[in-house]
């Protein structure tokens, strides 16, 4: 079988898997359960949760946003699902927001880089100063726009290289990092977006390539479908989320400050998609992890670094 045919087969399988995951009617309702660490977002305005990150300034506050089709806005929420505030983001468009990141200087970053058909030429990240969730003003302004493109992407529509969608963003060592969502293999590529090049449209080249040990979902190969990322505040642990698994990676740096960091997968936690459905958001909460699905359910994994085979929810003994 030639490569384009194989890529088409993978694409159809991935689309079918996404449709099956979204087909909530075939599953019983997700129960809210303190035993399993499950909460539900209280607002119907958050109807397609896509990005989640914890504030480093306001205790107990997480910032969230919807997927494509929503207006440019972010929500302040608690880990219990309470909505604490909603803020319109002025100076920004929302074509396909996919993830949100945070730095140590009080900035949020919104990744408008959803690229399902690999044909977008307006990929960008917006920087927004983090608002006070208690503020009476309900709008904030983006103070920086970072446009970019993938230097290694063929500009024409090509099913043989269907790997330039992205749903994962994190801030590391003064730059933004993007993890791609692949539809032709079981890998993801990491790209570094420098904050210092905001006045141009930088052509990003891959810095690292990671092989993901993925499992079939409903018998279909969903490939390297990374749907979210978050860097621990200590800068040494990275969480990558896919439809059916959660990966914990270490981040190691060389003594050479110009050398890129090294990423190594040290833990894989299998997700029971009958329970978690289509998870697309992930955030560290101290040393625990919150996962969010498109239906607005939050799942807590209390000990993601525990040794041995892992599964969420755990199988009954």
Image (tube, rainbow, N blue to C red):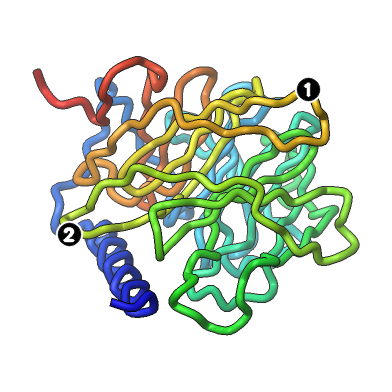
Quadrant housing the C terminus: top left
Q: In terms of secondary structure, where does tag 2 sit?
A: helix
Left or right of residue 110, residue 316 in this image: left
Report, in whole angstroms, how far the alpha carbon at label 1 lies from the one at label 2. 53 Å
Query: Image point 23% across, 52% down: which residue?
Result: 216
Position of residue 64 in the picture relative to residue 35 (left or right): right
Of residue 99 and residue 208, the one placed in the foreground of this image is 208
Front tag of 1 and 2: 1
Camera-side residue of 76 and 107: 107
The mark found on residue 155 in the picture is: none
Residue 289 at x, y percent in the picture: 45, 27
Figure quadrant of residue 247: top left
**Badge 2 is on which residue?**
25
- Label 2 Cα crowd, 10 Å radius (few <14 / some 14-19 / many 20+): few
The residue under the point 44% across, 26% down is 266
Looking at the rendered structure, the secondary structure element under dot 1 is loop
């Amino acid at each position: 079988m030639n490569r384009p045919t194989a890529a088409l087969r993978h694409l159809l399988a991935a689309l079918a898997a996404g449709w099956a995951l979204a087909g909530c009617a075939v599953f019983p309702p997700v129960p809210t359960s303190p035993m399993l660490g499950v909460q539900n977002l209280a607002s119907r305005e958050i109807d397609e949760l896509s990005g989640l990150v914890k504030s480093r300034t306001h205790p107990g506050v997480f910032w969230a946003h919807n997927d494509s089709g929503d207006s440019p806005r972010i929500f302040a929420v608690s880990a219990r699902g309470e909505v604490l505030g909603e803020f319109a983001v002025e100076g920004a468009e929302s074509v396909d927001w996919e993830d949100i990141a945070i730095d140590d200087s009080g900035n949020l970053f919104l990744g408008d880089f959803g690229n399902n058909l690999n044909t977008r030429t307006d990929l960008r990240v917006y920087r927004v100063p983090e608002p006070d969730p208690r503020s009476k003003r309900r709008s904030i302004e983006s103070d920086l726009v970072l446009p970019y493109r993938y230097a290694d992407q063929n500009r024409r529509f090509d099913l043989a290289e269907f790997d330039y969608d992205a749903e994962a963003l994190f801030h590391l060592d003064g730059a933004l990092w993007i993890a791609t969502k692949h539809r032709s293999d079981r890998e993801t590529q990491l790209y570094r977006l420098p904050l210092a090049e905001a006045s141009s449209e930088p052509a990003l080249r891959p810095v690292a390539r990671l092989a993901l040990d993925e499992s079939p979902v409903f018998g279909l190969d969903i490939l390297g479908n990374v749907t979210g990322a978050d860097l621990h505040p200590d800068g040494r642990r990275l969480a990558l989320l896919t439809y059916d698994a959660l990966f914990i990676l270490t981040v190691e740096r060389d003594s050479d400050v110009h050398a890129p960091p090294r990423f190594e997968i040290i833990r894989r936690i299998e997700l029971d998609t009958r329970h978690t459905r289509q998870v697309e958001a992930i955030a560290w909460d101290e040393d625990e992890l919150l996962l969010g699905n498109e239906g607005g359910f939050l799942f807590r994994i209390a000990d993601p670094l525990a040794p041995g085979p892992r599964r969420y929810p755990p199988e009954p003994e």
